[in-house]
Image: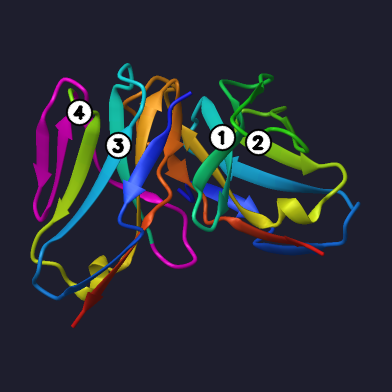
Amino acid sequence: NAGVTQTPKFRVLKTGQSMTLLCAQDMNHEYMYWYRQDPGMGLRLIHYSVGEGTTAKGEVPDGYNVSRLKKQNFLLGLESAAPSQTSVYFCASTGYGLPGYEQYFGPGTRLTVT
Amino acid sequence: GENVEQHPSTLSVQEGDSAVIKCTYSDSASNYFPWYKQELGKGPQLIIDIRSNVGEKKDQRIAVTLNKTAKHFSLHITETQPEDSAVYFCAATLGDMRFGAGTRLTVKP
């Protein structure tokens, strides 16, 4: 049981390039989330999904797109990377979306945009 | 939306001392308040949580208190150990989870 995994672990992009971050979970969780973590700002929700085939915007969705084609995978895409998207990205999942349930986090992806 | 403020941003204590981290939230409808610990290079991990119908919860050396009237909650760590050194995040949940900015705790041996 690997929990939540993220690939890649590190990535450097040039401004304007695109990339996709992959999150996978093996806990059969319905709900999945993408956060970004910046110094002094905690974690901020980018997009989330309440089940296979669904996506919704979070607190800071601009510049990102997501897809949930399979229940176990949640992809985060950057179509045209900007230096402001330099951050550490975390994926999380939970069995229930209602408040009161632990979110399980992946190890993170450190993205640098030059 | 919900706004969570966390203090202090850094905290240094001697091994064996207690550490207290405080958070305030803005939306009185928030009803779930978890605390996460993040070690260097890892994702956050839940250490304790409390629901709005409970005032206090304890798990060994860790306790959380909630004051719904004042809209603040606190994490208390007693008998701190070097392995408690990490960044701690509070969060308040109303639909989605809003996190505080984090507290870097250093426990000096």
Instruction: State the separation of the CA atoms marked 4 and 1.
Output: 30 Å
Give residue B4's quadrant in the image: top left
Give residue B2's quadrant in the image: top left
Residue B101 lies, in percent from the top left, at: 43, 49
Q: Are marks 4 and 3 in contact (CB under 8 Å)?
A: yes
Callout 2 secondary element: strand
Q: Which chain letter goes with mark 3?
A: B
Q: Nearer the viewer, mark 3 or mark 1?
A: 3
The residue that disc 2 covers is A74
The residue that disc 4 covers is B70
Q: Which chain letter goes with mark 4?
A: B
The amino acid sitting under disc 3 is: Thr
> Any magenta on residue B60?
yes
Q: Are marks 2 and 1 in contact (CB under 8 Å)?
A: yes
Would you place residue B84 above or below residue B75 in this image? below
Q: Which chain letter goes with mark 1?
A: A
Q: How is the image coloured?
A: rainbow
Discs 4 and 3 share one subunit: yes
Instruction: State the separation of the CA atoms marked 3 and 1.
Output: 24 Å
Instruction: State the separation of the CA atoms marked 4 and 3.
Output: 8 Å
Residue A114 lies, in percent from the top left, at: 82, 64
Q: Nearer the viewer, mark 2 or mark 3?
A: 3
